[in-house]
Image (tube, rainbow, N blue to C red):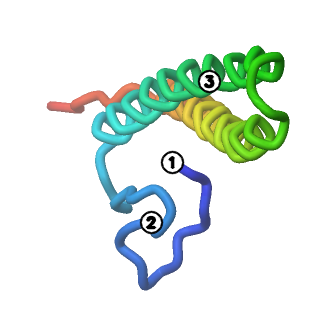
Amino acid sequence: MCHVANNATNTVCRDCGYKFGQSLQSLRKLLRRQLHGSAALFVGLLAFDVAMLAALFYVPMIVVVALIVPSSWLTYRVANKAFISRHSLKLLDAKEAAMPEARLLTK
């Protein structure tokens, strides 16, 4: 999910919590949940960033800078997480499309 290399001794990713060896359907569900959560948080943080820029006219500059710098960094991180989730879903779709159809051969 987060594209961190799998260490042979780890069963769970330390960054995103993904359990290695899960089915593709559960991975798809996790990625969609991560994408929707990141998108919602991104919208909220972006609204906060815009509000802080508007507050420049009413609040002392030091207060706005103290709030907007960490908020902007967090907005970037959340946007990056959403991008990685979307990219992972596209890779998963391409992987499933490339898989041959399973057929039962009988006599």
Which amino acid type corresponds to the residue marked 3 in the rendered image?
Phe
- Position of residue 81 in the picture relative to residue 15 (left or right): right
Q: Earlier in the sequence, mark 2 or mark 3?
A: 2
Horizontally, residue 55 falls left or right of residue 46, namely right
User: Residue placed at 78% from the left, 21% from the top?
Assistant: 53
Instruction: Tell me the number on the disc at residue 13.
Output: 2
Q: Are marks 2 and 1 in contact (CB under 8 Å)?
A: yes
Q: Secondary structure at mark 1?
A: loop
Q: Is residue 48 above or below residue 72?
A: above
Q: How far apart in space, not on screen, are marks 2 and 3 (Cα)? A: 31 Å
Q: Look at 39% across and 26% down and name the residue there.
A: 101
The 10 Å Cα crowd at callout 3, few under 14, some 14 to 19, many 20 or more, is some
Secondary structure at badge 2 equals loop
Question: Which residue is identified by label 3?
Answer: 48
**Residue 71 at x, y = what percent?**
67, 39
How packed is label 2: few (under 14 Cα within 10 Å), some, or many (20 or more)?
some
Q: Which mark is residue 85?
A: none
- Amino acid type, residue under disc 2 in the picture: Cys
In the orientation shown, which residue stands out farthest toward the bottom? 9
The mark closer to the camera, 2 or 3, is 3
Label of residue 1 in the image: 1
Q: Position of residue 75 (x, y in %)?
A: 66, 35
Q: Is residue 101 above or below residue 70?
A: above
Which is more N-terminal, label 1 or label 3?
1
